[in-house]
Amino acid sequence: MFDAEYFNLGYLDTLSYQNTVIHRLDPRAKLIATLAFILTVVSFPKYEITGLLPFFLFPVLLISFGDIPVRFILKKVLLVSSFAVFIGIFNPLLDRQISISFLGISISGGWISFLSIMLKFFLTISSALLLIATTSFPGICHALQKIGMPEIFVSQLLFLYRYIFVLLEEAMKIVRARDMRSFGRKGHDIKTVTRLIGTLFLRTMERAERVYQAMLSRGFSGSLHTVKPYSFRAVDAVFLFTTIVLLYLFRTRDIVGTLGRLSMRALG
C-alpha cells in the first residue's frame, strides 16, 4: 500500500516526459498562462457560478492535447477536496437568505457560495496538477528562474520537492523492515510508531548530508542548470496570447448567458 502511494506520487513527473504539443511548449508560457488562469478564477465574487463554467475549457484542452489521464487528475483533486469542503461547508449555515428558486426549490446564498468555492477549487487545483504533468517540477523551477525569481528561492523550492521523495524512500525502507520483523501483525502501536518517526528523522538527516556532499563533489555552486534547452518560440507566444485573451473574454463577458440567448433564438 505504501509502495503504491509512493510510485503514484511520482507519476506526475512520469507524465511530464511525454512528447505532445502541450509538453513541447516553453515552461514560461505554461507557467504564466496557468498563473493568469488561477488569478482570473479566484477573482470572481463568491456567488458566481455560471461565469466559472467557460473556464473548464482550459483544463479540458490541456488534458486532451497533453494526453493526460482524466481519472488520475480527478483522483488527485478528490484526494485534497476535503480542505475546500471544510472551508465552505459552514456557508449554508451562516448565509440562509434565499437567493434563487429553481423548480420550486429555494436555494440559499450559502449553498451557492459553497458551490462556487468547490468550482474554484477544482479549476485551480486541476490546472496546477496539469502544469506539473505537462512541464515537470524542475521545468517549473527553471521557468521561475528565467522570469526573474531569486535563485535561492528557486533552489530551495526544487530541493523541497526532491527531498519529499528522499523522505518517502527512507520511510519505505523502515516500514518494510518493521513488516518483515513482525510479519505484518505487530509494530502498529503508538510507542513503536514514535520510535520509527525518530529513526526516520535521523536517517533522512544522514541521507541529506550525503546528498549534499555528492552535489558539492559534482561542482554544485547554488545555480540550477537544465539539460534540456528551452527557447520562447512563436507558438509559445501564440499559446500565451490566446489564453490571456480568452481569460479576459470569459471574465468580462457573460458567455453562458450569450450562448443561452443565441440558443433560444435559434430554437424560436
Image (spheres, rainbow, N blue to C red):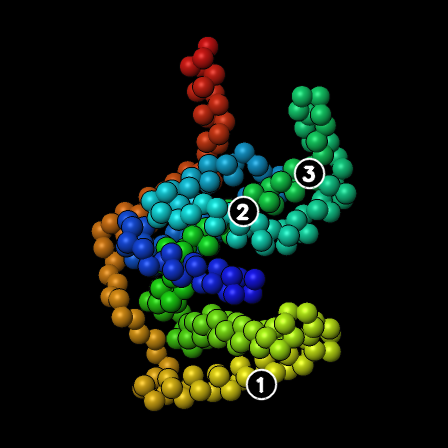
Q: Amino acid at mark 2?
A: Phe
- Circle 3: element type: helix
Between marks 3 and 2 in the image, the one whose residue lies nearer the viewer: 2
Q: Amino acid at mark 1?
A: Leu
Give the percent coordinates (x, y) of residue 255. Answer: 46, 31
Name the residue: 73% across, 47% down. 90
Q: Is residue 254 visible?
A: yes
Label 1 near label 3: C-beta < 8 Å?
no
Name the residue: 73% across, 74% down. 190
Which disc is residue 111 wearing? 3
Which residue position is annotated with label 2?
A: 122
The front one of 25 and 184 is 184
Name the residue: 60% across, 45% down. 118
Which residue position is annotated with label 1?
A: 202
Check the image and name the residue furthest to the front: 183
Q: Amino acid at mark 3?
A: Trp
Q: Which quadrant of the figure has residue 228? A: bottom left
- Circle 1: element type: helix
- Up the image or down, 12 lies above or below 49; here it is below
Q: Is residue 148 visible?
A: no
Label 3 to label 2, Cα distance in Å? 17 Å
Label 1 near label 2: C-beta < 8 Å?
no
Sooner in the amino-acid sequence: mark 2 or mark 1 = 2
Categorize mark 1 by other alpha carbons within 10 Å: few (<14), some (14-19), many (20+). few
The front one of 20 and 256 is 20
Sooner in the amino-acid sequence: mark 3 or mark 1 = 3
Give the percent coordinates (x, y) of residue 97. Answer: 75, 35
The front one of 203 and 123 is 203
